[in-house]
Image: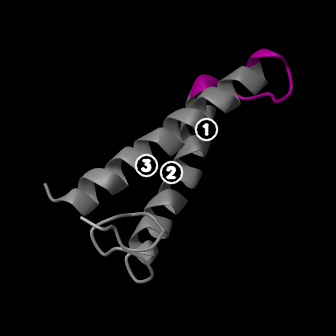
């Protein structure tokens, strides 16, 4: 697996995990009325958007990274 896909996978999984944890925490303190399955499905939306952002970032920054920052100096 090349560097870009590892980078994109890490960012996507991190986005999903943080979103899911946030939704479950909010649901646990009655800020929302979501079940675990609903939270898991909803958390996939920002994770999917993270994939889109990562792919589009290759057009702006380093083509081997999902970052919007400039090219690396490696």
Q: Residue at x 77, y 26 (%)?
A: 26
Q: Residue at x 82, y 16 (%)?
A: 29
Q: Is residue 37 toward the left or the right of residue 2 in the image?
A: right
Give the image location of residue 43, x and y in percent.
58, 42
Residue 17 on the magenta segment: no
Q: Which mark is residue 19?
A: 1
Q: Quick one: which residue is furthest to the bottom in this view?
A: 59
Asked if residue 67 is positioned above or below residue 13 in the image, the reply reads below
Residue 31 position by quadrant: top right
Residue 34 on the magenta segment: yes
Q: Which mark is residue 47?
A: 2
Q: Which mark is residue 11?
A: 3
Element at label 3: helix
Q: Which residues are magenta?
A: 28-36
Q: Quadrant of the N terminus?
A: bottom left
Give the image location of residue 54, x and y in percent.
43, 66
Asked if residue 39 is positioned above or below residue 3 in the image, the reply reads above
Q: Residue at x 82, y 30 (%)?
A: 32
């Amino acid at each position: 697996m090349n560097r870009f896909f590892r980078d994109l996978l890490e960012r996507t999984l991190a986005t999903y995990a943080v979103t899911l944890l946030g939704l479950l925490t909010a649901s646990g303190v009655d800020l929302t009325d979501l079940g675990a399955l609903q939270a898991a499905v909803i958390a996939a939306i920002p994770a999917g958007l993270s994939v889109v952002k990562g792919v589009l970032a290759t057009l702006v920054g380093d083509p081997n990274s999902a970052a919007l920052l400039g090219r690396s100096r490696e």
